[in-house]
Image: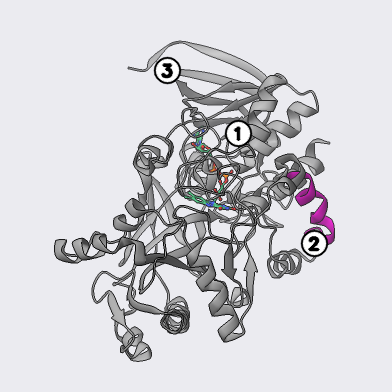
Amino acid sequence: MINKIGVEKIFCEYLIIGSGAGGSVACKYLVDKGKDVLLIEEGDHYEINQFNKSISKSFLYAWRNSGMTPVISKSNFGFGEGKCLGGGTYINGGLIWRTPEIILDRWNNEFNTDIFSMDNMTQYFEDIESTIDLSSLKNNVEDNSESKKILEIGKKNNIKVVKVPRSINSSEKDNELILGAAGKTTNSILQKFIYPSKTKGLRLMTKCRAQKLISENDQIKYVEVIKDNLIKRIYSKKIILACGATQTPMIIKRSFGNSFFKSEINVHLNLRLGARFNENMQINSSLMFSQQIQEYLHDGVLIMPTSFNKNNFFSSLAKLTNKELMQIEQNIQNYSSFIIQLASSSNILLNNFRDNTILSYNLNNNDIAKLRKYFVIFCNALFNVGAEEIYLPFKKNYKINKDTNLKIFFEKYLLNNNLEMVSVHGMSSAKMGQKKEKNIIFDINGKSFDFKNLFCLDSSVLPTCTIESPQATIMAVALKILNDNFN
Ligand SMILES: Cc1cc2nc3c(=O)[nH]c(=O)nc-3n(C[C@H](O)[C@H](O)[C@H](O)COP(=O)(O)OP(=O)(O)OC[C@H]3O[C@@H](n4cnc5c(N)ncnc54)[C@H](O)[C@@H]3O)c2cc1C
């Protein structure tokens, strides 16, 4: 029961709500400047490697909604994000990519500025990479069979394949990581940003949920939070929202109503393909992949392996019959999985209904056309490097082989009601802009147009999606916002 009598008041100079990629940068920056900082996090604190490779335990405890938040859509679609100290950075692949230049150019063009040029942003990327000690992680892992296939595809088809940065969440020596359960890392965001800040005086409250922002005139007067089933009020001179792509808009909507602000989330869609080869593909399973096809980045498409794990793989094959699953199990070492990732041109719509996050999405014809094109290209390429059978992320008609006429097949079956998609990259749900509009409530410095002491510096404030994995972009943009506002 929530006790409403004798509400406790807490005071601080800076309140950061959410401890993920954006919030962790804010806490380190402000604590290093000697500020009085309180960081609150809805989820719990889990030790490094606490789940010891168990994806199901990680889902249960460290992810929002125990794994996937359903998105109402004609296809099967789940959205995944973290809910624990470190947010998404605790459960993610830990790949630190700088923002592609075409994205930075897009932002500069939109805002008629050069503040997001690579020249300007490099200092922030360097700062983040140096704190993480990225240069200490050498990606010399060549033993990942799927990555070798990607390299072979690159050579055969003369297309751009790049080396993936070493995962900061993987084990120290051999880059081992079950995606979704942090490994034996030494370079994670907890270790490099949050724990050191704690040593220097950061005040931290986990299992503490910010419910509402309470305003008075043009200021947020206090934030109502729930901790240990009790309502508390936090009074802070400055408030930084860093609740992630779904929850930053949600707290705004809970506070000021759905109509105050129209939130749409930009997403990267992940479509997973399982391929059977006539050779052992799992000499070293669970290694983070080391190669990625970047040839189609200009079109918003990346193709890469996943870090293969049997349980993970089976979870994507739930639609198969028992007989089919048994056959796969017998030859599991011959299987591998890959992802086609698309920066979708349609957005997830987000609404608050009685404190529930309601997400809905409709895949548009543009995206369907792109997916058809790249499924043909990639399946063809896989067959040319030895794949014998491919399991598609389709609800029906999910199995193809070398004899399938790919063009005809995908025209017929790659439909917006036949896909199985996941997204773990949501962003731009409270995107920055130059003037206030129905869907823009923060300026290009991350500052609220409505409330003088409110800022946003997580994935939600990014102007658009990033095509590449977003964590480093979120962190670099957060650092830029902090530098511009709080120096
Ligand atoms: C499985 C997976 C793999 C990924 N792999 C990569 C990768 O390899 N590279 C990469 O760049 N990106 C990756 N990402 C994406 C990346 O992790 C996210 O984009 C990033 O963490 C988002 O940062 P954020 O600060 O916006 O929010 P988050 O990291 O989501 O953090 C927000 C935090 O705020 C807390 N919170 C929310 N609401 C409240 C509230 N009301 N009160 C208090 N606290 C609240 C949440 O519990 C959460 O912990 C991956 C994501 C997932 C899920």
Query: Of residues 369 and 230, which is closer to you in this image?
Result: 369
Measure the alpha-carbon separation of dots 1 and 3: 23 Å
Helix, strand, or loop for circle 1?
A: helix
The majority secondary structure of the magenta stretch comes to helix
Query: Of residues 44 and 97, which is closer to you in this image?
Result: 97
Mark 2 lies on residue: 118
Q: Amino acid at mark 3?
A: Asp
Q: Residue at x 70, y 58 (%)?
A: 98
Tell me if the residue at label 1 has its CB under 8 Å from ligand 1: no
Of labels 3 and 2, the one closer to you: 2
Vertical position of residue 386 compared to residue 344: above or below? below
Of labels 1 and 3, the one closer to you: 1
Task: Decide whether residue 340 is among the magenta residues.
Answer: no
Q: Which quadrant of the figure contains the N terminus? A: top left
Measure the alpha-carbon separation of dots 3 and 2: 45 Å
Query: Of residues 126 and 457, which is closer to you in this image?
Result: 126
Q: Residue at x 71, y 32 (%)?
A: 28
Mark sitting earlier along the chain (2/1): 2
Mark sitting earlier along the chain (1/3): 1
The reply to whether the C-beta atoms of the residues labelled 3 and 2 are less than 8 Å apart is no
On the image, the x and y values in percent for residue 39 come to 61, 27
The reply to whether the C-beta atoms of the residues labelled 2 and 1 are less than 8 Å apart is no
Of labels 2 and 1, the one closer to you: 1
Mark 1 lies on residue: 190
On the image, the x and y values in percent for residue 261 come to 53, 50
Q: Amino acid at mark 2?
A: Met
Helix, strand, or loop for circle 3?
A: loop
Measure the alpha-carbon separation of dots 2 and 1: 27 Å
Instruction: Point out the stretch of residues depicted in magenta.
Output: 114-128
Mark 3 lies on residue: 228
